[in-house]
Image (cartoon, rainbow, N blue to C red):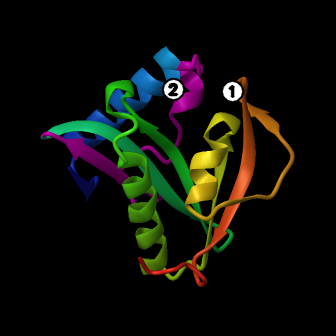
Amino acid sequence: MFIKKVILDEDLKAVFAIRKQVFVEEQGVPLNDEYDQFDTLNGLCEHILVHYNDQPVGTGRLRVVDGAGKIERICILKPFRKLGLGRVMIKALEEIAEEKGVLQVKLHGQTQAEGFYKKLGYQISSPIFMEDGIPHFLMVKELSTREIV
């Protein structure tokens, strides 16, 4: 398993393919809602790509919004879940945030993933809200108090 920052168009295409499979096909998110102005290699955000057995299987991105790191579009192809890849992806995105001098990260976590994010130190900071027909929480983590493992 390895994670890399996306800097090549071919890797960005792999990111899009994974997101389409997970969010659009599996979870029913409208295709028009899945992609936005940050889905480029122009530096507006950092995309990562996770490989398992030399195959791209997961992705996520980080943007800096109002001084906080916003972790977005976290997904792993179904056959590769429960292998610990999500934990590694979140840690990689947190490290990118720290490199940018960000002390807090936030994300819109699907309610079904609440336990996963809580184990990684995220706290719920909003009531449930709907995003593309899926219930979410705003979850926040302070990086300045993060334990080094």
Q: Nearer the viewer, residue 8 or 26?
A: 26
Indicate whether residue 47 is drawn in magenta. Answer: yes
Q: Quadrant of residue 2?
A: bottom left
- Which residue occupies 40% across, 22% down? 21
Count of numbered circles in the view: 2
How crowded is the residue under tag 1: few (<14 C-alpha within 10 Å), some, or many (20+)?
A: few
Q: Position of residue 117 (x, y in %)?
A: 59, 53
Q: Which mark is residue 132?
A: 1
How crowded is the residue under tag 2: few (<14 C-alpha within 10 Å), some, or many (20+)?
A: many
> Does the residue at mark 1 contact the one at mark 2 (Cβ under 8 Å)?
yes
Q: Nearer the viewer, residue 146 or 26?
A: 146
Q: CA distance from mark 1 to mark 2?
A: 10 Å
Q: Quadrant of the C terminus?
A: bottom left
Q: Secondary structure at mark 1?
A: loop
- Which residue occupies 61% across, 65% down? 121
Mark earlier in primary sequence (1, 2): 2
Residue found at the far right of this picture: 127
Q: Position of residue 90 (x, y in %)?
A: 46, 57
Compared with 67, 52 (above or below) is above
Compared with 118, 129 (above or below) is above
Q: Position of residue 130 (x, y in %)?
A: 78, 32
Whether residue 41 is visible, yes or no, is: yes
Whether residue 7 is visible, yes or no, is: no
Q: Position of residue 26 (x, y in %)?
A: 49, 17
Q: Which mark is residue 17?
A: none
Specify whether 103 is left or right of 74.
Answer: right
- Which residue occupies 80% across, 58% down? 125
Q: Which mark is residue 23?
A: 2
Indicate whether residue 134 is drawn in magenta. Answer: no
Circle 1: residue type = Asp
Circle 2: residue type = Phe
Q: Which residues are magenta?
A: 27-53
